[in-house]
Amino acid sequence: MATRIDAPATQARPADHALEAELERHRRELTGYSYRMLGSWFEAEDAVQETMVRAWRSLDALQARPALRSWLYRIATNVCVDMLQSPQRRARPMDLVESTTADSALPVPLPESAWVQPVPDGQVLASDGDPAEVAAARETIRLAFVAALQHLPARQRAVLILREVLRWQASEVAELLDTTTASVNSALQRARATLDALDLDSAAPLSVDDDEQAALLARYVDCFERYDITALVSLLHEDATFSMPPHPMWLRGPEEVAGWMLGTGAGCEGSRLIPTRANGCPAVAIYKPAGPGVHEPFNIALLEISGGRIAAIHHYLFPELFEAFGLPTRLEA
């Protein structure tokens, strides 16, 4: 979970606490920015924490308090660019391999650093505001969009997020990156061309009413907990996808999903589910049976919904995410 930055005890003054509160007000938006840059909530939290530490260490460099937000973004950008020196690009299973079948052997898992990780909505999205703006913000943390951003060089990535997602002016981005407006516009043009080539629009889920999402999620939870796979796959699109990071594999279509859940995945029968939200989508925390009356964390599953049906299910088999999402680490009868 996020760690607050406190001024050193030897320097604690009312002004310190006021500034700490002011810095904390920017934590959520900085986490969203860093998540889009890095593709990992854990890394995003580390980046924001480092940003806050650097901010405290160089407060004397801040001449005008109204510049605090842009100054923090400058620090966060530098931190993220430093963290992106590795050639490893985070991705989704469908970005790495072709679809497989339900009777295929479960492939050896790849390290956590290979995958775009989910992020809790509450850590990166405002809980109120204009509904249209909230909906637009949800789209910019979708797994497909965040995975696509990973194809961009670090500075192009920063330019595109600042200009297209956060709606900064080109001159503001140029000042933040210590470059020219022409350079910013050129980087944005190249970034757009790269994303256009990835054809994101064709994979975008249709806008779905929150009440409709909630109703479909409730039906999914009911079917899963009863382990009625016939009813469960009836909720899926005919070309729905099903993936399970850290395993580099994915399935397509209700028939393959049913075959998997009644075959290799049959150990999930008897699981309990807790609804949550991640990456602008409804999601569930799945707890597998671990003894009489006991269920332990297994995975966080994101459900992408389109046209009243489930278009994709992304299972993240990382139990450490449960605590990060504020979920119980154990369920008992």
Image (cartoon, rainbow, N blue to C red):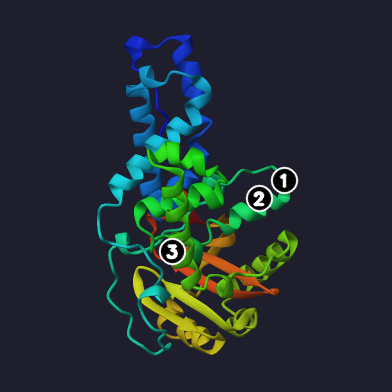
- Residue positioned 39% across, 12% down in the render: 12
Residue type at mark 2? Val
* Gap in angstroms between the C-alphas marked 2 and 1: 6 Å
* Gap in angstroms between the C-alphas marked 2 and 3: 20 Å
Q: Position of residue 48 (x, y in %)?
A: 40, 38
Residue nearer the viewer, 53 or 166: 166
| Mark closer to the chain start, 2 or 3 | 2
Residue 237 drawn above or below residue 303: below
The residue singled out by tag 3 in the image is 147
- Residue positioned 71% across, 52% down in the render: 132
Q: Position of residue 156 (x, y in %)?
A: 40, 54
The residue singled out by tag 2 in the image is 134
The residue singled out by tag 1 in the image is 130
Give the SS element for disc 3.
helix
Q: Residues within 10 Å of mark 3 (few under 14, many from 20)?
A: many
* Gap in angstroms between the C-alphas marked 3 and 1: 26 Å
Q: Position of residue 3 (x, y in %)?
A: 40, 34
Residue 13 drawn above or below residue 194: above
Extreme residue in the front direction: 182
The reply to whether residue 323 is visible in this rendering is no
Residue type at mark 3? Ala
Q: Are marks 3 and 1 in contact (CB under 8 Å)?
A: no
Residue nearer the viewer, 142 or 127: 142
Give the SS element for disc 2.
helix
Residue type at mark 1? Asp
| Mark closer to the chain start, 3 or 1 | 1
- Residue positioned 31% across, 61% down in the render: 112
Residue 122 drawn above or below residue 176: below
Give the SS element for disc 1.
loop
Query: Would you identify the image quadrant in which residue 282 lies?
Result: bottom right
- Residue positioned 34% across, 17% down in the render: 8
